[in-house]
Amino acid sequence: MDRIDTTAFAPPDRMSGGTSMTAVPITTAAMARAHVRAVVLEQWNTPSRRATETAVIDLLLVVSELAANAVRHGGGLVGVEVTSTREGVGLAVHDNSDVVPAAAFGPGGLPPVHHGNGYGWPLIIRLARDIAIERRPGGGKTIRVLVPLQTMP
């Protein structure tokens, strides 16, 4: 059964004691990137801590790859959850496929020859950590990662 819920949930800002959840419809990788950037600007960055632009670019690359993989290989993007942590940003991308990508647990080496795909997972492995893939009740999977963010001096 296909799920068409393409909602991203921005969890409450745990650092400031917030309790509400904001639902944002997500249907594309571009929308996922915009949502994640907003979470960084509104929840992760503080007056005493700001992510470097390079760290944000790396984060958005991971978001793009995970969202595009969900659309291209995962039977559709079901949802995206974004969590602001002290170390960076936690992402959970939900799709409709039960298939666990073999490359997700590889060494992160780039393929020697490009045949139209194959760079996404190596980049995710290099830029993220705590990669976990969970099967969802009722079908599909969730891919969770933590992308550390470096701060400006």
Image (cartoon, grey):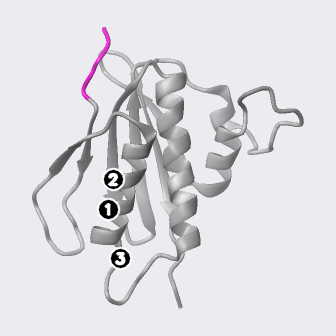
Which residue ends up furthest to the top in the rendered image? 1
Q: Is residue 138 above or below residue 40?
A: above
The answer, for residue 130, to whether it is visible in the render is no
Residue 86 quadrant: bottom left
Q: Which mark is residue 89?
A: none
Q: Is residue 13 above or below residue 91?
A: below
The residue lying toward the viewer, choosing from 76 and 150, is 76
**Which residue has dot 3 on it?**
45
| Amino acid at pointer 1 | Val
The magenta stretch is 1-5
* Residue 139 at x, y percent in the picture: 36, 16
Q: Is residue 49 left or right of residue 125?
A: left
Q: Are marks 1 and 3 in contact (CB under 8 Å)?
A: no
**Which residue has dot 2 on it?**
35
Label 2, secondary structure: give it: helix
How many numbered discs sit on the rendered protein?
3
Q: Are marks 2 and 1 in contact (CB under 8 Å)?
A: yes
Q: Which mark is residue 39?
A: 1
Going from N to C along the chain, the mark reached first, 1 or 3, is 1
* Residue 89 at x, y percent in the picture: 42, 60
Residue 12 quadrant: bottom left
